[in-house]
Amino acid sequence: MEKMKSPALESNDILFGSDPTERIVAVEPVDGSKMRLFMRRKGGVESRDEIFHPFMIIEDEALLDNFNGSWQTEGLSGANEYRHLVFFENWSECQRAKTYLHKKTGKPPSSPRAPYLFVSDPVHQYLLLTGKTLFKGLLFDELHRMALDIETFCAPGYEFPNPLREEDRIISVAIMDNRGNSQVFFGRDMNEEEMLLALGEKITSLDPDVLEGHNIFNFDLEYIAARARMYGIPLNWGRDGSRPKIRRSRFNVAERIIDYTRFEIFGRHVVDTMFLLQYYDVTARKLESYGLKSAARHFGISDDERTYIRSEDIKWTYDHRPGDLKKYNLDDAKETLGLSELLGYSFFLQARIFPFSYQNIFVRGNATKIDALFLREYLRKRESIPKPAGRRAFEGGYTDTFVKGVVQNVIHCDVASLYPSILLTYGLNPSREKLGIFLPLLGDLRTFRMEAKTCAGEAASPQERDYFEALQQTFKILINSFYGYLGTEHHHFSDPELAAEVTRQGRHIIRQMLQWLREHRAIPIEIDTDGIYFIPPPGMETETAAQAFVERLSESLPEGIEVAMDGRYRAMFSYKSKNYALLDFEGNMIIKGSALRSRGMEKYLRDFLSSMIRLLLEGRGEQVYELLNDYMGRLENHRMGISNLAKTETLAESPEIYRQKVSARKRNPSATYELALLSEREYRAGDQISYYVTGEKKRVRVYDNCKLISNYDPEHPDENIAYYKDKLMSFFKKFEEYVPHAAGQQAVRGKTL
């Protein structure tokens, strides 16, 4: 495969690491004092071992005076707290030293006040010390990825399959990789034990770098591991023939905590596409659910001939139409592979930059990744490292709403990367970052992003375009994370006082923009941290005129602060701060804000709201009452569809912890958790539950009147019509003031506050 041209950024040692070793696909610890590097070559994967001396960084050499072990100390330059780099013979010695210091100081390694800095992942340590990263010189298509999906039988009388129930079992296993290999191991062709053995042999023979699956951690791999234990089958899937290391773990996606069963396979990475969807939806907020089929339809990667089988029909299809089940299983693997290719590209590129394994890139926050860049460079320069600054409260960005209702001819302009631009324009550097790499690195990232955008526009092939587009998106995320890093609590070069100064400058710039707009007869509608929606002055109805107006606004601001026109819209519905809807000139509608599109509300309410807003934006507000009556009629006649009435909620903690809190009266009962406790399935934090409300009165205690959506019987509907009608009417009343009452009224005038 021909190697694509690459921007000069990959020669930046601070960003990509100083070691140029290419085509590393995995790094694994061996014997506590070596690291095994796996490199993908044309003929397959080669490996080699390198010496590894684990390390810690301590404040004072005297801390280890009475430690019974072998170590070497190297002094670090500068006056920061962590100034002594200590090397150990092997990993167990390093672990013993960590335990010793914990007991001696009373501070665990996770404490920002601990007088020692311990990095708990040996692979991360090795990459920090050497400057190596994964995947240099490797194209995404060259990474060997294999998707895995299983279908299971659930015994009659139970809702969910349980691998510990003997009569439950795996009935089909599908694999598909990005090299054209695919296969289904089927329960009518071999028994379950033979299927598990055949799967292991196939993984070993094809030798993928990555195993992928949708909910693969909390379902497929857990189920496979449990059934393998039942038969005494070792899952020797590692590149050294070892079994997976399995442990409970968790990570955060925005405000969400995800509990999962982590599988570590020697020499390989495991990627869960459900995690990718959750990352994507943090900013997009467009997904109806995190289910594979729903996501594949959302992204348009489902084939027209895609086979669909309801979960309750799996066993019947297995018995009567086995070919359909095989295709269904393989289609799941195919869509998993497609989702990973679409959403995993930027994480692949991040693995070239950050000193983490590919699998760990997915569960590390952006601030942690940025901190790792500084740690790596400070270690390379043998410079001392500061303790974290700790948390301090400070005022955030300026947001406001000046007009409510529907307005016409709206322009959105924003400051390109407002906070990073302020940092660079005013030369604001973290107070304890003594090497002076913060601002140059931020400036290089901004330059590299523009270079990558140019390369994307000039790409000679779709493959090149996708590469550079993913690259520039990755840089955009990193650039905007530099400001967020400053205000964090546990990172070494954070600076809350500087973060406060940046937001102060940001508020000042936004107010300058507001003043200029008003002086030039524009009407501001909404401010959202770094951008403004406004109605331009008369005579600005064309794209060219609007663009020229925004350019004049940009010229009025300090040098280095640039404003660009981000969009022009036929109409806008402004509801409240950060909650609005836009209608572009092609008829496309964009809805922003949890009050207007929250997944926390039932689908029938989201659909009603979306239809109502479109009527308002299109000047057909008088038809909203017809829409309301139609929805009421569909509810009364059981024509709404139970999936439209159901709520889907994510467990933020385990059901057992919930039970303890309710018993201790530390929280109120919840329908989601009560249903989880009643189910025979073992739910955990991060799992989702869909349920609907039963009963006859509009005022009911939901946690006492609810059912799982899977238990709904359309032949005997028992949804609470009065409850859902009342909820719709209460919901409508929140927006009634924006709905015209006079017949024939064509628009709602914006109401100035």
Image (spheres, rainbow, N blue to C red):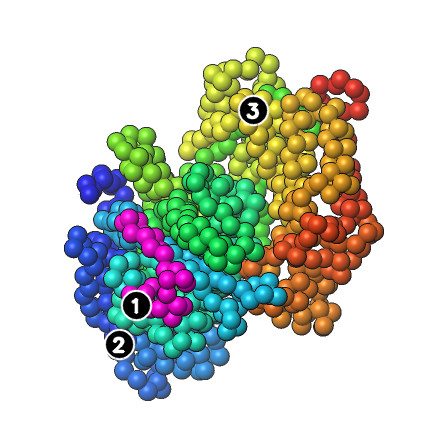
- Say whether residue 603 is magenta: no
| Disc 1 residue type (three-letter) | Gly
How far across and how far down the image is residue 351, in percent? Answer: 33, 53
**Residue to which mark 3 is pinned:** 587
Q: Earlier in the sequence, mark 1 or mark 3?
A: 1
Q: How far apart in space, not on screen, are marks 2 and 1 (Cα)?
A: 16 Å
Q: Which mark, by number, is residue 238?
A: 1
Mark 2 or mark 1: which is in front?
1
State the residue at coordinates (58%, 65%). Answer: 156
Q: Is residue 538 above or below residue 490?
A: above
Say few, some or many: other residues with alpha carbon within 10 Å of mark 2 (under 14 / 14 to 19 / 20 or more). Answer: few
Visible in this render: residue 381? no
Residue 752 occupies which quadrant of the picture?
Answer: top right
Residue 480 occupies which quadrant of the picture?
Answer: top left
Q: Is residue 545 above or below residue 679?
A: above
Q: Identify the element where label 3 is drawn.
A: loop
**Residue to which mark 2 is pinned:** 31
Q: Identify the element where label 1 is drawn.
A: loop
